[in-house]
Amino acid sequence: MRQDGDASKVTISDVAKSVGVATSTVSRALTQPGRVSESMKARVVAAAAELGYRPNPQARSLTSGRTHSIALLVPDVTNPFYFGLIRGTQAQAKAHGYRHILVDTEESAEVEATALLEVSASVDGVVIAASRLSDSALAAAAKQTPLVVINREIDQVPCVIIDTATGMIQALDHLASLGHSEIAYLSGPASSWSNRKRWRALQQAARSLGVTCHQVGPFAPTMQSGAAAADAAVRYGVTACLFFNDLLAIGALKRFAERGIRVPQDMSVVGCDDIFGADFCNPPLTTLTAPIEQAGRVATDMLVSALHNSNTAVPVPRQREKLPTHLTIRSSTGDRPAASGKRADSE
Amino acid sequence: MRQDGDASKVTISDVAKSVGVATSTVSRALTQPGRVSESMKARVVAAAAELGYRPNPQARSLTSGRTHSIALLVPDVTNPFYFGLIRGTQAQAKAHGYRHILVDTEESAEVEATALLEVSASVDGVVIAASRLSDSALAAAAKQTPLVVINREIDQVPCVIIDTATGMIQALDHLASLGHSEIAYLSGPASSWSNRKRWRALQQAARSLGVTCHQVGPFAPTMQSGAAAADAAVRYGVTACLFFNDLLAIGALKRFAERGIRVPQDMSVVGCDDIFGADFCNPPLTTLTAPIEQAGRVATDMLVSALHNSNTAVPVPRQREKLPTHLTIRSSTGDRPAASGKRADSE
DNA sequence: ACCAGATTGGCAATGGTTTGTCGTAATTTG
DNA sequence: CAAATTACGACAAACCATTGCCAATCTGGT
């Protein structure tokens, strides 16, 4: 290796000149496996290394149309739920040799639409989590740009779904088996697809279990809103609550503690997602464990494989992956209080 | 607006043809303020909108040399500490109209060096957090690519430093004032610059405070390692410990609970960073609150302003920002236990 | 009217790479 | 050994937007 001082300025034609061949030969030697002889390839590679040649990605993607990067659009980078997604997509993007571009859409359909439009020109594909866009807008976007959506079910658009709806039923079952009959579902944003799905599932399950489940909300999916959600739950006189997500549940845990409501003796609390922190909050949260990171990985894999297949054939793979969740029982759920007031226990 | 069906294929020459002018005129109309007449500009803009023209970012950056994106390199996207950084840089990048590229360097100097080399060709600038690279390597890289480092102090390289060293002294002070005299510092990775800084500061402070402070470790900065760290602290017979970061501290909290060691009655625990979760773990963690997100924002601002100044003059701004931390006292610290054994309290 | 100077638009080169097409040399086959 | 085939490398045209430079037009001053 020579000095790297001018490495950034070395072009393919410098390499070509150094070897004494055409630029096309250099290009093919470096990118197209069997297109040039072994000896030529060796000479080119040697020269490239010697000169410290690094292909210019901009020029490369100008002709090839590939940018070797994918974008992840999330409503709110601040929310720990999306951290998992970021991890998963980041890891898998890297594994496939793709650059990972992160965009915060600020919980806004408009920002999301703009971001999608802008970013789609500079990436090979996009994965969108918890989109605020309409089905038709997403379907239209998917026709322009390779797209995978997470937690959204749309015809003709590859998607990965974390099946919290089914999981919620398990959670309700768990509460019912502990004797609870008055239960609240503290719901998330009205624009959330998973929120609607869950509520529908809960309604059905409540009926067949013979318990009553009130929908309360909507609440913003943040810890701050947890306090309001907690108060609302108390107002409804329930003995157990299912929260839209762990953030809300943890916020509520705090509020319950402030108000002297003991969890789980006075109130059982179930979260959703099993985010970072759910296992060490106080008390540790019974929650629906969602394979968040895996969802990110699967989505990325689907996207990448779609990118590769786009050359060959298979126009619409129409993939649809549904990831199961499971209930993780920790210490925030317990038997229904005997009376409506406090309960005298050995503790 | 016409159909967007072919929007992605509309080039500048299509617009030019539509207006009946040269491509150069279109380009100038859209990008160079006073270069064309108002009427012409209006016609061009109208035509561009009509055709759904979107400039190709690749082509644009090929000539301009700008990619309008910056990269953030972090050792481990999994670590909540970096979430704050991701948020801060993401938000600010977006505010300045830059794309945000996220790269995980896997706590490895080698991976980091490679990533830096690769990514630097496709971004305008890079911010590196908690670099594992040597000072000289970073200084060299900074000459090639606009660079801002976080938590690292290097000559001629703009940097933002979260001053945990000074904060640690405060923490030690706090512990000393509670009567503790045997204290452990559960240290982080040996390759961590801040770790070294902190330990140096602690040694001095311990001397002047008349307490003894043992360095124990190194430990990986993860919750799992917290258990080992906790055990080590117990082995040293200390009554208080300062942890390299909150992750480690929270992990230790769990371990202490398992072993029946009460916090803070038997053992005082101080974390560092005040990550998400530090306020709701059990007990809530006394910790050094670091302005993590702000650090990300400041670093990004420095980078962006450097990018803009690079045109004009000012070769090396040699910026250096030191952000103060403060001790947030919660419930994991308390008075030194009276004896070496358990302490009889009203609780 | 005439000219200096300012506006405004066009031509063409430029950036670095990929890729279709073609010629030539090497290799295999009959 | 000639003919058919293959392998290899070169030429040049894209890809799309930017920009230096020049020409034409227009302004206003004399």
Image (tube, coloured by chain):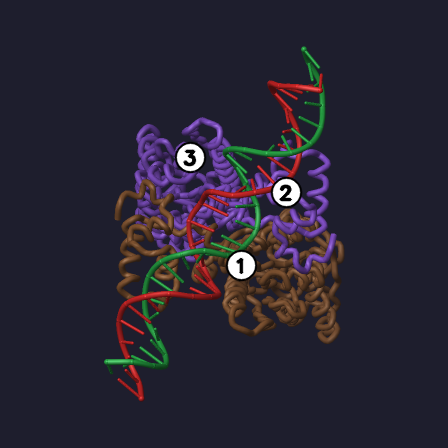
Chain colours: A brown, B purple, C red, D green
* SS at mark 2 in the image: helix
Measured Cα–Cα span from mark 2 to mark 3:
41 Å
Comparing labels 2 and 3, the label whose residue is closer to the camera? 2
Q: Do the residues bearing badges 2 and 3 touch, measured as CB atoms within 8 Å?
A: no
Q: Residue A160 appears in which quarter of the rendering?
A: bottom right
Name the amino acid type tagged 2: Val
Measured Cα–Cα span from mark 3 to mark 1:
33 Å
Name the amino acid type tagged 3: Cys
Residue to which mark 3 is pinned: B159
Tell which of B333 and A77 is nearer to you.
Answer: A77
Same chain assignment for discs 2 and 1 = no
Say which residue appears at 29% left-offset and 62% top-offset: A40
Indicate the position of residue B148 as horizontal and vertical percent values: 43, 38
Tell which of A135 and B344 is nearer to you.
Answer: A135
Q: Do the residues bearing badges 3 and 1 touch, measured as CB atoms within 8 Å?
A: no
Measured Cα–Cα span from mark 2 to mark 1:
27 Å
Indicate the position of residue A130 as horizontal and vertical percent values: 63, 59
Name the chain letter of the residue that bears numbered label 3.
B
Say which residue appears at 55% left-offset and 49% top-offset: B57
Name the amino acid type tagged 1: Asp
Q: Is residue B41 visible?
A: yes
Name the chain letter of the residue that bears numbered label 2.
B
* SS at mark 3 in the image: strand
Same chain assignment for discs 3 and 1 = no
Q: Is D12 located above or below residue B171 in the figure?
A: below
**Crowdedness near tag 2: few (<14), some (14–19) or many (≥20) residues, C-alpha within 10 Å:** many
Tell which of A129 and B232 is nearer to you.
Answer: A129
Q: Left or right of A1: which side holds B253? A: right
Residue to which mark 2 is pinned: B26
Q: Do the residues bearing badges 2 and 1 touch, measured as CB atoms within 8 Å?
A: no
Comparing labels 3 and 1, the label whose residue is closer to the camera? 1
Per the rendering, the mark at residue A124 is 1
